[in-house]
Image (spheres, helix red, strand yellow):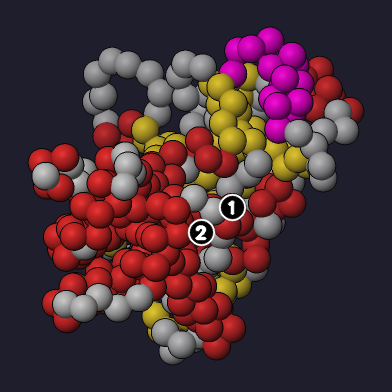
Amino acid sequence: MNFPFYIAKRYAFSLSKTTAINIITVIASFGIIVGAAALFVVLSVFSGLRDFSLSFANATDPDLRIEANSGKSFFISENQEQQLKNSKLFTKYSKVVEERALFFYKNKEQVAYLKGVDNQYIQVNNFNNYLFAGNWLEPNSNEVVVGSGISRRLSLGLLDYNNVLEVFVPKPGSGMIENPDDAFNKSPLLTSGIFQVSEDIDDKYIFSSIDLAQGLLSYKPNQITFVEFKLAPNVIEEDAVATINSIFKNQVKIKNRAQLNDALYKMLNTENIVVYLIFTLVIIIALFNLIGAIIMMIIEKKGNLKTLYNLGVEIKHLKNIFLFQGNIISISGGIVGLFIGIVIVYLQQQFELIMITPTLAYPVRMEIINVIIVFATIVILGFIASKIASSTVSKKLLE
């Protein structure tokens, strides 16, 4: 063991003769412990919130989705469908037609997305698991499944044969319109079910059969907006993408779950970075106390340092004493803080100490990456603070 580290360890774990130095050192250590624990807890909370938010997207979005490179729709041939069916990379795939439409019900109106789906759709993403009233729509019918937000705004009931829901979609084409009634394709709809996933989805979609949507949009039978895929178990996403590109001759855009929820991922990552920076600032403020404590320790030990210097110890070794001391204090505080943070997160996971609602606990997730981030932050910032403080040891000070 080299002597600078040995002396640094003695200084770090023994009381100083000056009470003020002891108090400042305790405050610095306490600040590092609290900062490390708080940073780990907050990062774990955001990991839990990220999983909670993405659980809805993961439940309702496909593994992969293809759409037209340009325009709103594209054509899928029988040969392409046969190749998709023959591929062992996909468990199921579903054809989808989607477009904004205007809905009327009892003198109320609502703009929403009409999403026409085939009978494979609920096998691709299990969307029917989110029905809280009624049943999933029958194929080749005028039945629809409505988001709970839309149903509340329109005061929709289930299977209301006396008051049907009407949908209006602008007819394709150009030119002057003499009769407004001729400008829209329309159809009566019967609400067979109501789903509830998340606020944005509940306020956005009304599901119908794909035949109904194609008829309203004047699409041909093989004209669609999307194809959504459920990958077979253990399939590598890149292999599936390559197969799709081969079948469709690179004429479609392919998106995975992350790309379908790009805005959500960006928002969660931005929030995570902002919170990390805020709590890192708290740790930096705590480390100012560490700098002060080390500088005061240098002043107090000036006589001892002079003796060592006169015995031939180089200045850089004297600086290392206080560099090591600061690192020992910061690393020890980081370890204790991480331990406390891990205990807090574990208790929340096991006993649900803090609740968002009476039935929903605050989500947290313990990840090794968060441990690494917190420890690395403490080590790096502690080293910088110790380096700044130890730089006050100089020839001028000892002469």
- Amino acid type, callout 1: Asn
Res 250 label: none
Residue behind mark 2: 371
Q: Earlier in the sequence, mark 2 or mark 1?
A: 1
Q: Which of the pair 189/318 is nearer the observer?
A: 318
Q: Does the magenta stretch include residue 243?
A: yes
Left/right of residue 322 with respect to residue 53 in the rendered view:
left
Instruction: Name the spot of residue 13 as percent of width and height, x first.
Output: 38, 73
Q: What residue is shown with label 1? A: 58
Rendered image quadrant of residue 317 = top left
The residue drawn where x is 11% and y is 44% is 399
Q: Is mark 2 on a helix, strand or loop?
A: helix
Please tell me which residue is depicted at 82% across the width and 42% down the height of the picture.
Answer: 234
Q: In the rendered view, tell whether residue 241 sits above or below residue 17.
A: above
Going by the numbered disc 2, the residue's amino acid type is Val
Residue 253 on image: x %, y %:
56, 22
User: 254 or 35: nearer the eye?
Assistant: 35
Q: Which residues make up the magenta segment? A: 237-252
Residue 102 seen by the camera: no
Assign a secondary structure to mark 1: helix
Is residue 141 something that shows in the picture? yes
